[in-house]
Image (cartoon, grey):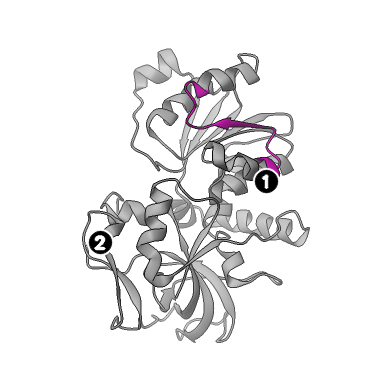
């Protein structure tokens, strides 16, 4: 089969298209899908640099999120059948075929492309806002990288739950974020983002921060969270790592600092993940969450898609089409 192969840990520029990758074989509890669309995520970029805790060693087929048609099932699989269009996460998504250990049917009325994000970006945004961030009507939320796939989901969800949304994005993406309902849109590259956020909140700070950038943005997040009650939910490090000490938390930033990895959430709290997915499907059925259309690239252009995402030159969800 055709697939992308990562040949080094030096970044996505060392990803190449191959035509002789073996078609994977599903295990007893797995399904095999013909990939219709594969999601592109920051985690994919981190892996090409060897920066994740469970990083595969090259050469490997990258990608972990995909949607497509089931073409084979393991002998123990009874809840899904051949021909069903599903979306799920596993490994080796940037290929024509992929094995998934679990999957969800694509919601009625959505294409495979439009279902990307349902298992990754939307649950991340919802987990950050509700069970972890405990957002409530009347509270204020700061969302970094608000024009990205998870950021856009977070803006829409936060508004649905009655929060005031302060969104940070680069200037060329402000119209996109405003259209989602953000109350205030700030330049993420501004000279003093923290001062702007504090001015908007009359110096009080925000109740919840969704932090996925790292670096100097992480310092901003700590500075603008309300003292004592503010929550900073960290779900990524798109730019660089950042650090905080116990001294910082006692004497500078008396806030709640919470880490979020949706993969670990699925593994360690499957009941909670099931509740999140149940709520998402209820919101879809109620018409609150309408389908978007990702920016698509041919499979061979995977390195280009990852490079553009790494350079923060994209808006919303990205997908590779095998």
The residue labelled by disc 2 is 14
Q: Earlier in the sequence, mark 2 or mark 1?
A: 2
Q: Relative to the observer, which residue lies in front, 270 or 189? A: 189
Q: Is residue 228 visible?
A: no
Tell me if mark 1 has few (under 14), some (14-19) or many (20+) residues whose alpha carbon lies within 10 angstroms of its own: some
Q: Secondary structure at mark 1?
A: helix
Q: Is 262 on the left or on the right of 242, as rendered?
A: right
Q: Which mark is residue 156?
A: 1
Q: Is 245 on the left or on the right of 112, as rendered?
A: left
Say whether residue 187 is magenta: yes
Q: Is residue 188 visible?
A: yes
Q: Is 278 on the left or on the right of 188, as rendered?
A: right
Position of residue 237 relative to residue 276, above or below, is above
Quadrant assignment for the N terminus: bottom left
State the image coordinates of residue 57 (x, y, percent, origin top left).
Answer: 22, 62
Position of residue 168 relative to residue 152, above or below, is above
Q: Relative to the observer, which residue lies in front, 304 or 59? A: 304
Q: Relative to the observer, which residue lies in front, 226 or 39? A: 39
State the image coordinates of residue 91 (x, y, percent, origin top left).
Answer: 38, 67
Res 18 quadrant in image: bottom left
Say whether residue 201 is magenta: no
How far apart marks 2 and 1 lie (CA) works out to 36 Å
Q: Secondary structure at mark 2?
A: helix
Q: Residue at x 42, y 79 (%)?
A: 97
Contact check, label 2 and label 1, Cβ < 8 Å: no
Q: Residue at x 30, y 83 (%)?
A: 22
* Magenta stretch in the rendered image: 178-193
């Amino acid at each position: 089969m055709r697939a992308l192969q990562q040949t080094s840990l030096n970044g996505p520029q060392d990803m190449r298209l191959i035509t002789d990758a073996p078609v994977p074989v599903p295990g007893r509890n797995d399904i095999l899908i013909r990939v219709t669309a594969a999601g592109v995520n920051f985690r994919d970029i981190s892996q090409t640099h060897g920066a994740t805790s469970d990083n595969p060693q090259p050469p490997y087929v990258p990608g972990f999120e995909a949607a497509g048609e089931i073409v084979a099932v393991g002998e123990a699989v009874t809840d899904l059948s051949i021909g069903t269009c599903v979306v799920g996460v596993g490994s080796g998504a940037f290929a024509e075929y992929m094995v998934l250990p679990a999957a969800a049917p694509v919601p009625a009325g959505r294409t495979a492309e439009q279902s990307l994000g349902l298992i990754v970006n939307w649950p991340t945004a919802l987990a950050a806002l509700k069970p972890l961030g405990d957002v409530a009507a009347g509270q204020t939320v700061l969302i970094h990288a608000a024009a990205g796939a998870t950021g856009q989901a977070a803006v829409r969800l936060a508004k649905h739950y009655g929060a005031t949304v302060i969104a940070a994005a680069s200037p060329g993406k402000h119209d996109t974020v405003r259209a989602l309902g953000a109350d205030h849109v700030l330049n993420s590259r501004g000279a003093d983002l923290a001062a702007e956020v504090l001015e908007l909140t009359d110096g009080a700070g925000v109740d919840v921060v969704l932090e996925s950038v790292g670096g100097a943005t992480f310092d901003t997040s700590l500075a603008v969270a309300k003292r004592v009650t503010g929550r900073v939910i960290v779900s990524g490090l798109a730019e660089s790592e950042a650090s905080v000490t116990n001294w910082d938390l006692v004497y500078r930033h008396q806030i709640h600092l919470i880490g979020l990895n949706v993969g670990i959430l699925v593994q360690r709290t499957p009941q909670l993940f099931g509740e999140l997915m149940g709520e998402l499907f209820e919101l879809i059925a109620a018409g609150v969450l309408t389908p978007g259309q990702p920016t698509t690239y041919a499979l061979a252009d995977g390195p280009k898609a990852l490079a553009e995402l790494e350079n923060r030159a994209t808006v919303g969800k990205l997908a590779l089409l095998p």
